[in-house]
């Protein structure tokens, strides 16, 4: 029997009108359900333009804020699991870049705060410091839906192979990363990193980007995609608003893991990757 989870990766156009951004996400959740999706994933920063100067204004609490309430309601009404991309989350005096997941009854199932903040400062070239306004999360996040364990990461988290490896060790068959690579790193690394995480860990990897907006202050690469546990790209969007529908087949996970038994043959007597608990 083919065991599968039908997913939709929704590459939304994001503008400066927060209410419009959220309404568009809700509409796409219902559309995806009509096409058969059981899980709908949204892009990074889908209710706000991407950039440190916007986060304070667009931030809201999770799960009490307006975006959370809208997604929870949409998840329940459509009867789908919603992996709510990311929003700037306000918690006390701090802001986080946060992905909230809603189950098909609208209940909060998981909440991942981006753990690796992207900071660079190359004199006379580019300065971009997320840590000026954001705080980093301090834990890994996995959840279970329809019998499949799913791990979450956000954008830059994708570059850290240990994080993906630990989520795989904990039983994940699918990793979902809302992300927004730029016009330099997108063509160079977006697909390569997705395939690397997939082939190293023998699981499905989904990346969900906002659509490209040439007029935005941060221009996203787009090209949301799905990679199977063999490392093959099974579907990829262009840069325009669109949705990618696919079935996550668990048989492929087992097939790859039995044919290439790296999970059993690691030399943990010589090296290991371990999770530390942070108090
Ligand atoms: C994108 O990010 C890279 C890595 O930080 C940076 O070197 C590059 O200048 C950025 N490109 C654009 C087009 O913003």
Image (cartoon, helix red, strand yellow):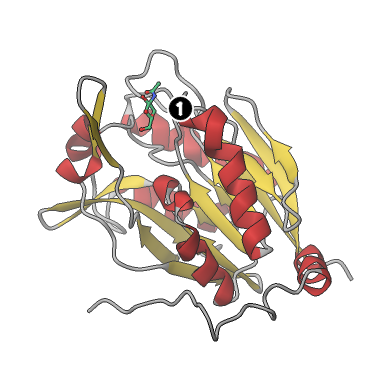
Check the image and name the residue furthest to the front: 270
Drawn side of residue 12 relative to residue 90, left or right? right
Q: Is mark 1 within 8 Å of ligand 1?
A: no
Q: How many marks?
A: 1
* Tag 1 secondary structure: loop
Residue 203 at x, y percent in the picture: 67, 62
Residue located 55% across and 38% down the image: 190
Q: Quadrant of residue 201?
A: bottom right
For the C terminus, the image quarter is bottom left
Drawn side of residue 58 relative to residue 9, left or right? left
Q: Is residue 29 at all visible to an observer of this figure? A: yes
Residue 91 at x, y percent in the picture: 18, 57
Residue located 68% across and 57% down the image: 199
Is residue 27 shown above or below 152? Answer: above
Neighbor class of circle 1 (other Cα within 10 Å; few <14, some 14-19, many 20+) is: many
Residue 33 at x, y percent in the picture: 66, 47
Check the image and name the residue furthest to the bottom: 269
Q: Ligand 1 is found in which quarter of the picture?
A: top left
**Which residue position holds label 1?**
220
In this rendered view, identify the residue nearer to me: 100 or 277.
277
Drawn side of residue 196 relative to residue 250, left or right? left
Is residue 5 shown above or below 241? Answer: below
Check the image and name the residue furthest to the left: 93
Check the image and name the residue furthest to the right: 1
In this rendered view, identify the residue nearer to me: 227 or 54.
227
For the N terminus, the image quarter is bottom right
Q: Is residue 204 at all visible to an observer of this figure? A: no
Residue located 48% across and 46% down the image: 178
Q: Quadrant of residue 276?
A: bottom left
In this rendered view, identify the residue nearer to me: 131 or 238.
131
Residue 216 at x, y percent in the picture: 36, 18
């Amino acid at each position: 029997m083919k065991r599968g989870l039908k997913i939709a990766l929704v590459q939304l156009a994001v503008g400066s009108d927060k209410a419009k951004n959220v309404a568009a996400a809700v509409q796409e959740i219902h559309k995806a359900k009509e096409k058969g999706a059981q899980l709908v994933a949204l892009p990074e920063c889908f209710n706000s333009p991407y950039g440190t100067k916007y986060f304070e204004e667009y931030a809201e609490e999770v799960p009490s804020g307006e975006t959370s309430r809208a997604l929870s309601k949409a998840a329940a009404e459509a009867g789908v699991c919603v992996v709510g991309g990311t929003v700037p989350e306000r918690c006390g005096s701090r802001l986080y870049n946060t992905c909230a997941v809603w189950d098909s009854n609208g209940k909060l199932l998981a909440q991942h705060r981006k753990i690796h903040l992207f900071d660079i400062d190359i004199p006379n070239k580019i300065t971009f410091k997320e840590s000026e306004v954001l705080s980093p999360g301090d834990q890994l996040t996995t959840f279970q839906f329809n019998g499949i364990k799913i791990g979450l990461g956000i954008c830059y988290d994708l570059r850290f192979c240990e994080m993906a490896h630990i989520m795989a060790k904990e039983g994940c068959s699918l990793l979902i990363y809302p992300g927004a690579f730029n016009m330099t790193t997108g063509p160079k690394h977006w697909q390569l990193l997705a395939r690397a995480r997939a082939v190293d860990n023998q699981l499905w990897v989904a990346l969900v980007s906002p659509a490209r907006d040439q007029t935005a202050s941060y221009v996203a690469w787009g090209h949301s995609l799905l990679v199977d546990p063999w490392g093959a790209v099974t579907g990829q969007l262009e840069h325009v608003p669109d949705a990618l529908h696919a079935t996550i087949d668990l048989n492929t996970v087992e097939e790859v893991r039995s044919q290439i038994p790296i999970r059993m043959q690691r030399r943990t007597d010589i090296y290991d990757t371990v999770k530390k608990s942070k108090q």
